[in-house]
């Protein structure tokens, strides 16, 4: 039973790390976009909040793709057992 708890805990830790890294990566990539063209005050609080929300949304989608792909890949070994 302890193996199950450890496995679930490691899965949760991996998910948190991948999610945070993905949001950070999305934030870095969004800094390269010229969103100033679309914003009235590109250095204002609302612009920063927009970048943050976009980074979280894009990072979440990217991390779900990575974690789902990992889960599917690990599930494939059940076909041969």
Image: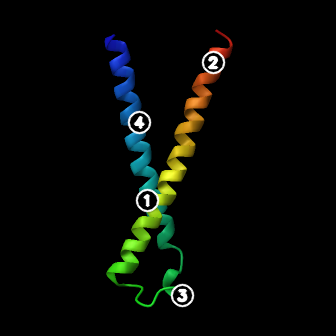
Q: Which mark is residue 56?
A: 1
Q: Nearer the viewer, mark 4 or mark 1?
A: 1
How far across and how far down the image is residue 3, in percent?
36, 13
For the residues labelled 2 and 3, the Cα–Cα distance comes to: 49 Å
For the residues labelled 1 and 2, the Cα–Cα distance comes to: 32 Å
User: Regarding mark 3 in the picture, which secondary structure is present there?
Assistant: helix
Give the residue at mark 2. Answer: 77
For the residues labelled 4 and 1, the Cα–Cα distance comes to: 17 Å
Give the residue at mark 4. Answer: 14
Q: Are marks 1 and 3 in contact (CB under 8 Å)?
A: no
> Vertically, is 58 above or below 3?
below
User: Regarding mark 2 in the picture, which secondary structure is present there?
Assistant: helix
> Which comes before the other along the chain, label 2 or label 4?
4
> Which comes before the other along the chain, label 2 or label 3?
3
| The furthest residue to the bottom | 40
Q: Are marks 2 and 4 in contact (CB under 8 Å)?
A: no
> Vertically, is 17 above or below 77?
below
Give the residue at mark 3. Answer: 37
Q: Are marks 4 and 1 in contact (CB under 8 Å)?
A: no
> Vertically, is 37 above or below 64?
below
Q: Residues within 10 Å of mark 3 (few under 14, many from 20)?
A: few
How far across and how far down the image is residue 34, in percent?
53, 80
User: Regarding mark 4 in the picture, which secondary structure is present there?
Assistant: helix
> Which comes before the other along the chain, label 3 or label 4?
4
Quadrant placement of the C terminus: top right
For the residues labelled 2 and 4, the Cα–Cα distance comes to: 20 Å
> Vertically, is 70 above or below 19?
above
> Which comes before the other along the chain, label 4 or label 1?
4
């Amino acid at each position: 039973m302890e193996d199950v708890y450890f496995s679930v805990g490691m899965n949760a830790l991996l998910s948190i790390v991948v999610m945070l890294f993905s949001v950070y990566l999305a934030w870095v990539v969004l800094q390269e976009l010229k969103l100033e063209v679309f914003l009235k005050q590109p250095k204002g609080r609302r612009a920063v909040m927009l970048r943050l929300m976009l980074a979280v949304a894009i990072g979440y989608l990217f991390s779900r793709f990575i974690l789902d792909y990992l889960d599917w890949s690990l599930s494939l070994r059940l076909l041969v057992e």
